[in-house]
Structure formats: structure tokens, C-alpha cells
Image: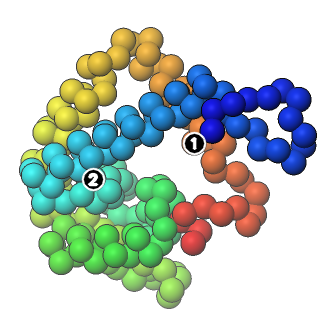
Amino acid sequence: MTTASTSAPADEPRWLTAEEQHVWRSYIEAATLLEDHLDRQLQRDAGMPHVYYGLLVKLAESPRRRLRMTELARSAKITRSRLSHAVARLERNGWVRREDCPVDKRGQFAVLTDEGFEVLRQTAPGHVAAVRQALFDRLTPEQQESLGEIMRIVAEGLQPAEAGADLPWLR
């Protein structure tokens, strides 16, 4: 629904204005198309979905190419169950291995293997080209800066610091 009313009763929903509806639908369309574009590129070039590539990048950027599984889930903004499934697939490919945490018997590390690092090294140029072509080459530097600022504000608002927040990596 696209009607807005400034004097709606308190129990009435705050419907989006026509302009807000237009912005929202443009965002949804662009985000869906961008994720599909990047997913297809990575499936074609490396046989992995975009989320798996992101996990490999996070591990490659970490000291000793390893992160605790809980930290990797938080960093990737995914559920622990989804991470466990993804790491199992990456293990089968030989790109990641799990190691037990020596100080916490319940904790595990995900570790990027040399083979996984090599896959990432070979895949990165094509992925960067796809990101650049799909997003950055279409925007002015000012638009890029605005988009970054907007996305940071949205992300910060969706990650409350209080205990009990319903965040993916806590599920």
C-alpha cells in the first residue's frame, strides 16, 4: 500500500509514501539482481556461491588465515547453522579445515587451506571485475560515498548492541 497519512491513529500502520515505496522497490530489485549477478559469476568461475567466497575472503584477511566459527558467523552476518553447512562444503572441496580450540573445548576455528587461498587468488580478479562493472562503474564518486554512508547507517541500525538482540550469528 502506498498511501501515507500524517494523522493516522496510533494503531494504524505507517504506510510508505509513494516515493518511499519507489525507493524500497528499487533497492530490493537492485540488491536481488546484484546478488544474482555475483552468485552466477562465482558459480561459473569457481563453482561456489557468493556467500562461500565471502567466507574465504574473511579467512584470508584474518591472522594465520583462521577465525573462530562464532566470529566468522558474526563477521559474515549469517546463522551458525548456515555457516556450519557452508564450512562443511568448503571442507569437502579442501579449501577450509576445522581445528578445535585449545582453550575452549566447544569452540572451533575455520582455517583457510593453501588450496583455498589459491582458489581465492585465482577467482578474485574476475569477482572484482564483476563488482566494479555491476556497481562502481555505474556510480559517480559522490554517489559511491553516499551509498557507503547509507549502507553503514542501515547496517548499524540493524545490529543493536543490547543483550538478547535477534541477530543471525546468535541463532
- From this viewpoint, is residue 167 visible? yes
Using the image as rendered, state which of residue 136 and residue 7 is in the foreground: 7
Residue 128: where, in percent of width, then height?
21, 35
Which numbered disc covers residue 155? Answer: 1
Left or right? Give the position of 2 relative to 117: right
Q: Residue at x 45, y 31 (%)?
A: 26
- What residue is disc 2 on? 50
Left or right? Give the position of 56 relative to 115: right
Q: Are marks 1 and 2 in contact (CB under 8 Å)?
A: no
When the figure is inspected, residue 141 is found, relative to residue 124, above or below; the finding is above
Figure quadrant of residue 131? top left
Q: Residue at x 51, y 86 (%)?
A: 106
Residue 119: where, in percent of width, then height?
12, 56
Q: What amino acid is found at the position of numbered circle 2 in the picture?
A: His
Q: What amino acid is found at the position of numbered circle 1 in the picture?
A: Ala
Left or right? Give the position of 55 relative to 167: left
In this view, the residue farthest toward the bottom is 105
Location of the N terminus by quadrant is top right
Q: Residue at x 31, y 40 (%)?
A: 33
Location of the C terminus by quadrant is bottom right
Q: Secondary structure at mark 1?
A: helix
Which numbered disc covers residue 24? Answer: none
When the figure is inspected, residue 15 is found, relative to residue 40, above or below; the finding is above
